Image (spheres, helix red, strand yellow):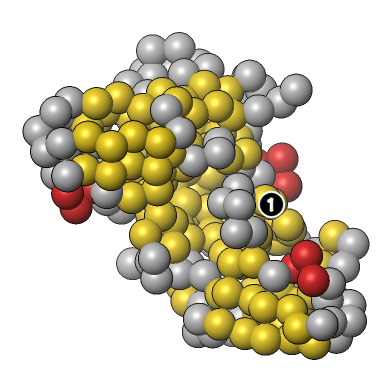
Amino acid sequence: AQKITQTQPGMFVQEKEAVTLDCTYDTSDPSYGLFWYKQPSSGEMIFLIYQGSYDQQNATEGRYSLNFQKARKSANLVISASQLGDSAMYFCAMREGTETSYDKVIFGPGTSLSVIP
Amino acid sequence: EAQVTQNPRYLITVTGKKLTVTCSQNMNHEYMSWYRQDPGLGLRQIYYSMNVEVTDKGDVPEGYKVSRKEKRNFPLILESPSPNQTSLYFCASSQRTSGDRDNEQFFGPGTRLTVL
C-alpha cells in the first residue's frame, strides 16, 4: 500500500540556520509526484515545492529545496536560512497515477517546525 | 482571484442530521478532492473527482458522499453524521495532468465540523 512517513513529529531550528525535514514514501508506481505543503497556525495549506518521479534534478524554490533520492524513496525538504515565519506544520504528499494523469493523493502525518530567535 | 471556497467555515451539528459542505473553484480545474485532517494523522483523502460525473474513493470514504455535476462544484455530503466525523475538512482542486507542478493542489480555507 502507498504510504508517506515523516519520522520527526517536532523539530526546532535556530533562526538563520538550515533545517532538513525528512520524508520517505512507498509506492510501486513508476510515475508519481512529491509535494511539500506548509500549514501555519492560521490553518491554510500553502504549496512549497514539487518533485516529479522522472525529474533528473532536485527541485528548488527560493529558500526551499528538495533532496530527492529515488532509490532510497526519500524526498527531504531543506529550508535554508530559517525565519521566524517558517514556524508551522509541514506535510509531505504524494500523487500517484499513470504517465499522463494523477489521481490519488496521500499525505504524511506532518512535522511541526519551530524556529527559535 | 483564483481560489477555492468552502462553506460553511464552521459547523456544529448533532448526530444524524444530514449536512452538506460546499466547495467551489474558479480555476477550471478538472481534479477536485476532499480531505479530513486529524491530529497526528495528517490529511486523509475522502473522495476525489477526475472530472464531471467521475468520482472515486480515497482512503476514508465511509460515511461520506460526493457528487460532481458541474466542473466548478464538488459538495461533500454527510447523510448521517457521527461524532467520529468531527474534524477539519479541506477541499482542493488542481489540473489533472501529470509531469510538472501544474498539478499542485489549491486548497480551500477549511471547514471545522463538530458533531455532538
Q: Quadrant of the C terminus of chain B?
A: top left
Instruction: Tell me which residue sits at (33%, 50%) in the image.
Output: B87
In the displayed structure image, the side of residue B57 where residue A62 appears, left or right:
right
**In the image, residue B91 lies at what x, y percent?**
48, 37
Q: Compare residues B13 and B96 and report the one nearer the observer.
A: B13
Q: Chain of mark 1?
A: A
Vertical placement of A94 versus A87: above or below? above
> What residue lies at 53% left-to-right and 44% top-to-bottom?
A102
The residue indicated by pointer 1 is A47
Q: Position of residue A59 (x, y in %)?
A: 80, 64
Q: Nearer the viewer, residue A18 or B52?
A: A18
Q: Residue furthest top?
A: B70
Instruction: Identify residue type, mark 1.
Output: Phe
Q: Is residue A1 visible?
A: yes
Q: Is residue A97 above or below residue A2?
A: above
Element on which disc 1 rests: strand
In which quadrant will I find the N terminus of chain B?
top right
Picture quadrant of residue A60: bottom right
Is residue A56 something one can see in this rendering? Answer: no
Residue A114 image point, x, y percent: 67, 78
Residue located at (56% from left, 51% from top): A43
